């Protein structure tokens, strides 16, 4: 395993991180005992960074982690959780208030059976009514949590990248880490435009969803995936091309993200030990000549035309429209 510094936190984290969304069956149905076994083996094989959230399965991810942590030494892993996004019910989905934030960390610690988390993060901050709430309520609450010893560092997460700069510039609370998803992958390299800024500020960079929440694999994305049709179509064509040439596109996608030099950890959900082993192997091996040729063709033919595309605003607008309809009843 390779380890990299997480900004100025002093943490040395595994270049491959474990995404807790898979524990809650976000992408496919999983069995709890199998999930615990996969996580335990992942840590034994050197993965020491785990990312989770109350939102993943309405607390299920954290609960399963808590079961696994009973048999894992605390010093062998770092865990990050989040506040702000909670329940499937649209009216209860987001709450960035101080009161809910303070309650959330206690719930998370109880579910995981821990005294503290290493990083506490604002979850998908673009869904807040405005960023002022993040600045004036959520982040100061996270500072209180940090001061109380329930968290060591503070992070922010989301999809729109410019929000990170806005919050970092305006926040009175020190931001230690940023986590974005689907912005450092084969079809979208936007995070690279922000890496010099984050590096200058000493902020640790976490890159999640190297396979684009299912876009960059043979099975394809779940029905709820918010990507525009052209992104889905190009990724589907790329997956077929890879399959026709007996190459696993998901492996190409993970390798692509692992090669981003300034990213501390690439976080991916792995529902089986086989997938974990394949991903770990990518850290120590190069693509074969055939795989490299397929990768180069896929990038040029299918991915490069998508590099200026994203789905910023689509999910947020859908959420606000649903919320407005409910409030108008």
Image (cartoon, grey):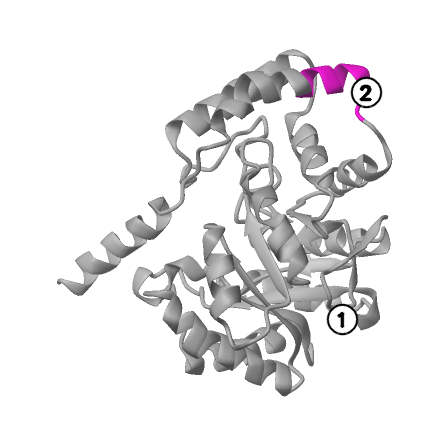
The quadrant holding residue 68 is bottom right
For the residues bearing labels 2 and 1, Cβ distance under 8 angstroms: no
> Is 185 above or below relative to 200?
above
> Is 1 above or below relative to 216?
below
Q: Position of residue 240 (x, y in %)?
A: 56, 17
Any part of residue 31 in sight: no
The quadrant holding residue 199 is bottom right
In terms of secondary structure, where does tag 1 sit? Answer: loop
The quadrant holding residue 190 is top right
Few, some or many C-alpha atoms within 10 Å of disc 1 (few <14, some 14-19, many ≥20)? few
Of 23 and 75, nearer the camera is 75
Identify the residue at horizontal 60%, vertical 22% (top origin). 299
Q: Which mark is residue 40?
A: none
Q: Position of residue 34 (x, y in %)?
A: 70, 50
Q: Position of residue 155 (x, y in %)?
A: 59, 66
Q: CA distance from mark 2 to mark 1?
A: 40 Å
* In magenta stretch: residue 294: yes
> Is 259 above or below relative to 164?
above
Q: Residue furthest top?
A: 244
Q: How many marks?
A: 2
Please report the bounds of the magenta region as a residue range.
287-295
The secondary structure that dominates the magenta segment is helix
Query: Residue tagged by mark 2?
Result: 288
Query: Residue tagged by mark 1?
Result: 70
* In magenta stretch: residue 236: no
């Amino acid at each position: 395993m390779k380890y990299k510094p997480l900004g100025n936190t002093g943490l040395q984290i595994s270049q491959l991180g474990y995404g807790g969304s898979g524990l809650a069956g976000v992408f496919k149905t999983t069995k709890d005992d199998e999930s615990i076994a996969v996580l335990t083996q992942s840590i034994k094989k050197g993965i020491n960074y785990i990312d989770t959230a109350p939102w993943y399965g309405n607390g299920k991810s954290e609960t399963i982690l808590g079961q696994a942590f009973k048999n894992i030494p605390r010093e062998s892993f770092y865990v990050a959780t989040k506040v702000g996004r909670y329940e499937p019910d649209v009216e209860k989905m987001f709450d960035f208030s101080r009161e809910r934030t303070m309650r959330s960390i206690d719930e998370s610690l109880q579910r995981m059976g821990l005294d503290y988390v290493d990083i506490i993060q604002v979850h998908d901050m673009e869904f807040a009514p405005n960023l002022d709430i993040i600045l004036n309520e959520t982040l100061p609450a996270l500072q209180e949590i940090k001061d109380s010893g329930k968290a060591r560092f503070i992070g922010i997460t989301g999809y729109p990248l410019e929000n990170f700069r806005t919050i970092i510039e305006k926040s009175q609370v020190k931001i230690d880490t940023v986590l974005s998803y689907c912005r450092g992958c084969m079809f979208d390299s936007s995070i690279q435009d922000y890496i010099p800024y984050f590096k200058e500020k000493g902020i640790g960079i976490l890159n999640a969803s190297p396979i684009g929440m299912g876009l960059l694999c043979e099975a394809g994305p779940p029905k709820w995936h918010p990507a525009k049709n052209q992104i889905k179509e190009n990724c589907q064509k790329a997956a077929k091309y890879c399959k026709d040439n007996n190459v696993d596109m998901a492996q190409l996608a993970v390798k692509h993200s692992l090669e981003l030099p300034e990213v501390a950890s690439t976080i991916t959900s792995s529902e089986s030990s086989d997938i974990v082993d394949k991903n770990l192997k990518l850290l120590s091996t190069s693509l074969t000549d055939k795989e490299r040729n397929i990768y180069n063709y896929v990038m040029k033919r299918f991915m490069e035309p998508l590099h200026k595309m994203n789905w910023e605003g689509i999910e947020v607008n859908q959420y606000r429209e649903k919320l407005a309809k409910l409030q108008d009843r």
